[in-house]
Each structure stands twice: as C-alpha cells, then as structure tokens.
Image (cartoon, rainbow, N blue to C red):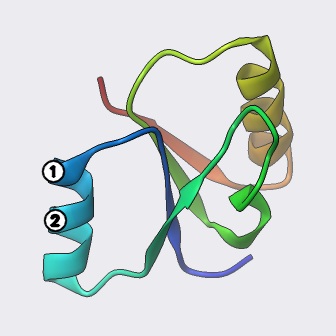
Amino acid sequence: MNLCAGIAGSSALWEHMLQREGFPWTHVDLTTGDGVEGCSVVIVTSPTDRAGLDTLAQFLHRGGAVLAAP
C-alpha cells in the first residue's frame, strides 16, 4: 500500500489542500474499485452505492483508512 490519498467523487477543496501540502493523491472509483488498491486512505466526498460500500469494506479489511467528508 502506497502513501497516497484517493478522492472518491469531486472535491476541489480536498484536491487543493492535498496539493498544497505536497501529499500524493489520485481520483478513485468506488463502484469499480479503480485506483483504490494504490491508496493508504480514501476520502469519500459524497454518499455511495452498495458497490462502493463493498469496495470500502474490502479496503478497510486490507488495512486502509477511510475519511468520510460530506
């Protein structure tokens, strides 16, 4: 697992803050799981569907962290 934040959804605030701090980040797709495996934390910016919840549950089970930020 890399030291990288994944942003699920769209958030100019999180993107700007992570860029300003020099913290690596990427966009991830919770429905398909694309990009999640390369992250140490996933920032969830909006409600997600059942597939997204399943992806997050697997991510947490593997030791990842989730930050829910409405």
Question: Can you give x and y, in whole percent of width and height, for residue 68 in the image?
Answer: 42, 31
Q: Quadrant of residue 36?
A: bottom right
The secondary structure type at the circle numbered 2 is helix
Question: Can you give x and y, in whole percent of width and height, for residue 16 in the image?
Answer: 16, 65
Mark 2 crowd level (few <14, some 14–19, many ≥20, 10 Å Cα): few
Q: Which residue is mark 2?
A: 17
Distance between the Cα atoms at labels 2 and 1?
A: 6 Å
Classify residue 12 as left or right of residue 5: left
Q: Which residue is mark 1?
A: 13
Please say if 44 is above or below 70. Answer: below
Type of the residue with mark 2: Met
At 49% from the left edge and 15% from the top edge, which residue is drawn?
Answer: 47
Please say if 63 is above or below 37. Answer: above
In this view, which residue lies farthest toward the bottom?
A: 22
The disc at residue 32 is none
Please say if 31 is above or below 37. Answer: above
- Could you tell me which quadrant the N terminus lies in? bottom right
The secondary structure type at the circle numbered 1 is helix
At 73% from the left edge and 22% from the top edge, which residue is drawn?
Answer: 53
At 79% from the left edge and 63% from the top edge, which residue is drawn?
Answer: 37
At 29% from the left edge and 23% from the top edge, which residue is drawn?
Answer: 70
Q: Nearer the viewer, residue 28 or 39?
A: 28
Classify residue 41 as left or right of residue 15: right
Type of the residue with mark 1: Leu
Classify residue 17 as left or right of residue 35: left
- Count the numbered circles shown: 2
Q: Contact (CB < 8 A) between labels 2 and 1?
A: yes
Mark 1 crowd level (few <14, some 14–19, many ≥20, 10 Å Cα): few
